[in-house]
Amino acid sequence: MNAPKPSLELLRGLTDENVLRALMAHDRLTRAEIATRTGISKPTISDSVQRLEQAELIVDTGERTTGRGRVGSYYALAPQLGTALVASITPHGVIAEAVDARGRAHGQVRTALEADAGQEVAAEALAAAAVQLGGQVDGRLRLAVVSAADPVDRATGRLVHLPDAPFLVGALDPPAVLAAMVTGPVLVDNDVNWAARAEYEHGCAQGVDDFVYLHLGEGLGCAVVSDGIVRRGHRGLVGEIAHLYTAGPDGQAMSFTEVFAALDLRRASSTAIDVPKLVEILEDTGADAARVHAALAHAISGVLSAALSLADPQTVVVGGTWGAHPRMLTAIEEYFTRSPRSVPVRAAYLPLPELTGARARAVDELGSLIVRSAHPTTTW
């Protein structure tokens, strides 16, 4: 039995996608250059360019080739295709930027926040950043990707309050906050998941499909990557390790977050870890500091042993403001290798990895949205 032939509309859609993707990867291209890069015949590319130009998805830049041979016209993505909003909400502030389908940022807004700023203040900062960026770019803000330094409900995109969460801005609802500024979907996930995606795509975990990303900063978090996919779980709370039981400083079992209370490493009147104090101890070579190093490494190794049992990763990536400190990493490796099971431990190295991960997803989603707009009735 012969397989059914694809419809003409589907073939046109696939060609148009190839043309659009080529122009997302380059500032400008002639039809001949697009044909070379896509492997599609020049007449087919010419027909596609004509369709896309009529649909106002690409434009003739007015630039022409020079030199011998037939003069060619350069084409580029239409400037009014819109941008995607990328935002990161951290204990210290909101960072937002608008990115186009080529991954270029068009403006950035930074708004400082206090650690206990609260839901309303954070919502106002996020909304104000979206309004400001929306006024700076051509076209619309067509979608948003948000990173939050807090647990995120998978179904709704709302932030979730868990016991002893140090930063949370209430049940902040980014999709609701951005509904009036963004015409399309608002995707929200926690910062550790976005950081893991960034390290997988651009950082130290490239080519590693199964790993655990442990974030050690003012807060504690973990991301589980399996078969190249960040696992989020039923509610989106995979990797919330603060209350996982591990070894305390005296050898007794206690929740991971309580280890820092027992070591007097929390900020005053907060469950957030006092990072400057902890880093100062890591830089100290005295006997008292060595005992803290050992206690932390023991507790962290217990968390990693649990992660190995449940996720079976190939490697562990450690990031955060103090987790990747050379002395901390060495101490973790020394304790972890004594465990019945262990895997290599490596340091994360991307700056602002959560923003990098969210930006990459925003560019990908915007590109797919543009492709679908060329043939909105086609089933891909």
Image (spheres, rainbow, N blue to C red):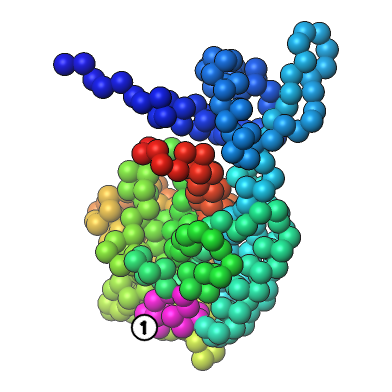
Q: Is residue 280 visible?
A: no
Q: Is residue 11 above or below residue 131?
A: above
Query: Residue 10: horizontal and vertical position, in percent?
Result: 40, 29
Question: Farthest front residue?
Answer: 54
Q: Which residues are magenta?
A: 159-173
Can you say whether 60 is above or below 220 in the image?
above
Residue 80, x across and y down, in percent: 67, 48
Q: Nearer the viewer, residue 98 or 64?
A: 64
Q: Main secondary structure of the magenta part?
A: loop
* Residue ranking furthest to the right: 67
Nearer to us in this view, 251 or 93: 93
Residue at position x 63%, y 64% in the image: 96
Count of numbered circles on the image: 1
Q: In the image, is 364 to the left or to the right of 351?
A: left
The quadrant the N terminus occupies is top left
In the structure shown, which secondary structural element does the residue marked by tag 1 occupy? loop
- Quarter of the image with the C terminus is top left
The residue that appears at 62% across and 47% down in the rendered structure is: 81
Q: Which residue sits at x=60%, y=21%?
A: 46
**Which residue occupies the extreme bottom position in the image?**
269
Among the 4 quarters of the image, the one containing residue 89: bottom right
39 sits to left or right of 237? right
Q: Is residue 98 above or below residue 237?
A: above
Q: Which residue is mark 1?
A: 163
- Residue 345 included in the magenta stretch of the image: no
Of the residues shown, which amino acid type is indicated by label 1?
Answer: Pro
Mark 1 closeness class: few <14, some 14–19, many ≥20 residues within 10 Å: few
Residue 8 seen in this snapshot: yes
